[in-house]
Amino acid sequence: MFICRILMVILLTLRIFFITDVEAFQYPKHVNPPERRSSPSRDTVKAYNRAETSANVFKSIMIGQPENSFPKELLDTATAIAVFPAKLKYGALTGHKGSGIVSTRDSKTGLWLPPIFINISGDNVTQYFDGNSDLVVFAINPDAMKAFFINEFKVEKAVTSQEFLTPSIADAGQRFHFVAYRHTNETLTLVNIENSTIKHDGMLNFAVYGERQLKPYLPTSKPISNRVLTFPLMLNSYTQKAN
């Protein structure tokens, strides 16, 4: 009799364990798992930082003293504007080393388009990367603007001194392709960037745009973060629509 009771207790224990185990196994099938939010990749965060820092650099120049700002005619004529900030959160300790961003202009609306992440290099521009100087490059004709959609190109026909910008920047655009300024301590200095090389930052462009081809009119099937668009939106607020 005593043995029978022990066997019954064992059977009851096994039954309870089995039922509980089965119910626990089946439970997730009837409950939606918690939503998982994917965090931005490191390259995406770098892209955000570069776009926001570049926008702040350009804005700081525009709200400074008029004599240390860009000529209005240059802003209205430019077909592309690139900024290479002196200091980036994820840049080298000694400076940006040529990391930047460029936005091209829609020839029909005059508005600035989603940016392309780029790098500039060359012995003639390395001297500007001292950790305290920003570099701002303007394309001043359609051919120069189109160059930014090439993965890598050499800068040719850049303005080398102030005299070439007179009497009209629009006229200079027929002879030259680029105008570059060094920005240090709220002071702008015209600099020569001829023979430097500009190349796409493939990792950052892929992080933002994926497999989409970089061209004047980017496909809009995938939303572009406002943290990237902050750069062209800022340019739109400081430049007039081209005629």
Image (spheres, rainbow, N blue to C red):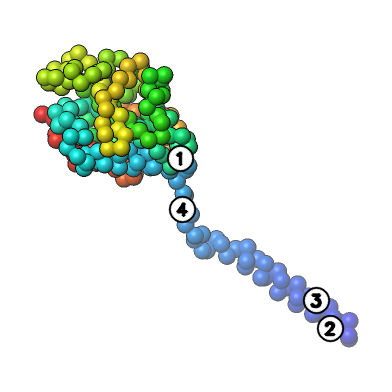
For the residues marked 4 and 1, what is the alpha-carbon distance in whole angstroms? 24 Å
The residue depicted at 48 percent of the width and 42 percent of the height is 42
The amino acid type of the residue labelled 2 equals Arg
Q: Secondary structure at mark 1?
A: loop
Q: Is residue 27 visible?
A: yes
- Occupied quadrant, residue 99: top left
Q: Is residue 206 visible?
A: no
- Residue 198's x, y, as percent? 37, 22
Q: Nearer the viewer, mark 2 or mark 4?
A: 4
- Occupied quadrant, residue 113: top left
- Residue under numbered circle 2: 5
For the residues marked 3 and 2, what is the alpha-carbon distance in whole angstroms? 9 Å
- The answer to which of 171 and 183 lies nearer the viewer is 183
Q: Nearer the viewer, mark 2 or mark 1?
A: 1
Residue 10 image label: 3
The amino acid type of the residue labelled 3 equals Ile
For the residues marked 2 and 1, what is the alpha-carbon distance in whole angstroms? 72 Å
For the residues marked 2 and 4, what is the alpha-carbon distance in whole angstroms? 54 Å
- Residue 111's x, y, as percent? 19, 35
- Occupied quadrant, residue 150: top left
- Residue under numbered circle 4: 37
* Mark 3 residue crowding within 10 angstroms, few (<14) / some (14–19) / many (20+): few
Q: Nearer the viewer, mark 4 or mark 1?
A: 1
Mark 2 or mark 4: whose residue is earlier in sequence: 2
